[in-house]
Amino acid sequence: VGNILMTFGPHFGLLLVGRSFAGFAVGLTLVTEPLYTAEASPARLRGMLNTNVEISFNVGILLGFTASWALDGLHYTTSWR
């Protein structure tokens, strides 16, 4: 729902509503996924699986910031902003 609103929202208000939905969903995932992984995985793999998930989230954030920094100098007609 959040991604659809962000993509097709005709004005800024719907973009904010979409971001709110998406942010809530990501937050819910960050809370529930490690709990599910810890309960469903074998005891010998729990730490590794939960660590991989957290590292993946942080690598994704790092890549987003790196891409933003690398594309910062684009001319305004080429930039997505």
Image (cartoon, helix red, strand yellow):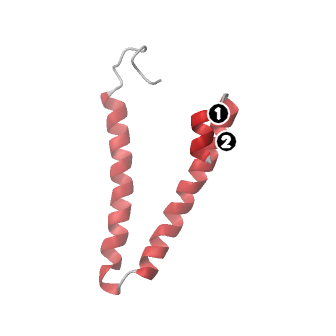
- Residue at screen point 39% across, 55% down: 57
Q: Position of residue 25 (x, y in %)?
A: 57, 55
Q: 12 or 10, which lies in front?
A: 10
Question: Relative to 53, does residue 22 appear above or below in the rendering?
Answer: above
| Residue for badge 1 | 9
Viewer-nearest of discs 2 and 1: 1
* Res. 69 mark: none
Residue at 41%, 21% (x, y): give it: 79
Cα–Cα gap, marks 2 and 1: 9 Å
Q: Amino acid under label 1?
A: Gly
Q: Position of residue 35 (x, y in %)?
A: 48, 74
Q: Is residue 46 above or below residue 80?
A: below
Q: Residue at x 66, y 28 (%)?
A: 10
Q: Residues within 10 Å of mark 1 (few under 14, many from 20)?
A: some
Q: Is residue 41 left or right of residue 32?
A: left
Residue farthest to the bottom, as pictured: 43
Q: Are marks 2 and 1 in contact (CB under 8 Å)?
A: yes
Q: Quadrant of residue 74?
A: top left
Residue 33 placed where, x, y %? Answer: 48, 68
Amino acid type for the residue under numbered disc 2: Val
Name the residue tied to disc 2. Answer: 17
Q: Residues within 10 Å of mark 2 (few under 14, many from 20)?
A: some
**Which residue sits furthest right?**
13
**Element carrying mark 1:** loop
Q: Earlier in the sequence, mark 2 or mark 1?
A: 1
